[in-house]
Amino acid sequence: MACQLQPCWVKGHLRKGQALASLGKTEEAFHEFLFCLILEDENQKVKSEAQRLLLNLFSRILGNTQENLSEVLLLLSHHSRLKGSLLSSVRSGGINHSLPSLLKVSTDQEKHCEDQKMTHCGNSGKPFQSHEGSLEENGAVSSAVETAPEKIGPSKKRRHAEVAANSDQPHKMAKRDQSDEKESSAGNCIVFECVDAADLECSLCMRLFYEPVTTPCGHTFCLKCLERCLDHNPKCPLCKEDLLECLAMKKHCKTVLMEELIAKYLPVELTERRKLYEEEMAEFSNLNKNVPIFVCTMAYPTVPCPLHIFEPCYRLMVRRCMETGTKQFGMCIGDPVKGFADYGCILEIRNVEVFTDGRSVVDSVGKRRFKVIQHSQCDGYNTADIEYIEDKMVQGEDRAGLMLLHDFVYDQAYRWFSSLKSALKIRILHHFGPMPLKESDPQMNPDGPAWCWWILAVLPLESRAQLPFLAMTSLKARLNGIRNILAFLSRTRSQ
């Protein structure tokens, strides 16, 4: 941003070059240092940085200059003035002593660059950018290869031939319009001349970047891909650098520049990628087919169910529930044969608190009961095709008898809870909340009165004994079951 606001500010381009060098982007950093020298050729700090970068870049050719000359020329394909200086140094045999001199610009070139710089900065307010040479570069490659034929083996000759052939081929995908050409001529930015969709693929999903994010170590991934990797290991998938700070932020910032480049140069591929993502989200938001199932404990309609999420598969499951907007998943108890029981309860997420290490506490509450039609799995967690179940309503004399039974069992449950020790009651109230009030019409809710589920949740029963109540579609049968359990607990206490 500093370089955009003040294109001719040497310090801004110097800092940008230092940052690029730290990220390992050697050629981009070297370009910034050259630009600084064009603006201020006597800046010792810039010369020192550029010399250090050059020494690292050319350290592998100091021992055998002629044999690796073509590789050096290929690295300098965007810096024709440096290439010319390097060729003259090689021909004079002084490559080891001429590296600092590569940073010097001839008087005519300095004057020419200074005139163009003043013209661009004065008229358009945009920075100067040196133009590339093409004919002179190709000629330099040919002449350099011819100078030492005895030192270039067959493999080297083949590589030089491939370089020469590739230099004559057109770009794979040239996507430039008139506005881009104008910006290039004004020296505003580096033009994206060659765009290949394969160059902008996520290394994790092998698909075009979607919602790209860049880690502190400089690697870019799809947002969803990176989150899934961090669920298992808080390290960069490529360089294994620690990314605990990314987890601590709890929210990743998308790389806006990458998104804009993809939208501009790969609009068709981006449309297909977005369509694929939307189809996946639509599949995850279906609450009848492939519903995510949390295999843990018993859950009941209207009863709170706080959860501690730490397993990677359930981190992914909860995150998808939030992203799709459904905020719902199924809860079932485990089954030794099928994996999870045939009946369960849909939970709705009310709040998620994420910790710095990726764990989370989920505040959820029961919504509806369901029956499992088909068991399946997805990305490590269980899923199921389900159908929802409701109580069967009764009328007439059956309804009158149901009302009497409802009032009797409610009073019985209230007396039992009141007889508990204070410490136990406080724990129950803290976990499940207060006992719901008696409803005037017990059939008003398709799952029955809320207090029935609350008392079932606090009764000292094993999960296998509680499961039949969840599957019942008769409120009368459920009330009779609760009455029998409360009577047994009262007799046990009196004995």
Image: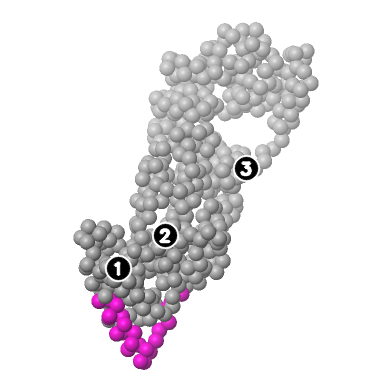
First in sequence: mark 3 vs mark 2: 3
Q: Secondary structure at mark 2?
A: loop
Nearest the eye: 27 or 359: 359
Residue drawn 36% across the image and 60% down it: 305
Label 3 close to label 2 by CB (< 8 Å): no
As drawn, the label of residue 198 is 3
Residue for badge 1: 492
Q: Main secondary structure of the magenta part?
A: helix
Task: Inspect the image, locate mark 1, and give the three-letter code of the amino acid beneath it.
Answer: Thr
Q: Which residues are magenta?
A: 389-411
- 329 horizontally vs 81: left or right: left
Image location (x, y in percent) of residue 275: 56, 57
Eye-nearest disc, 1 or 2? 1
Instruction: State the mark number for residue 297.
Output: 2
Side (left or right) of 367 relative to 218: left
Mark 3: amino acid: Ala
Categorize mark 3 by other alpha carbons within 10 Å: few (<14), some (14-19), many (20+).
few
- As for residue 396 lying within the magenta part, the answer is yes
Q: Which residue is painted at 23% across and 64% down in the image?
A: 420
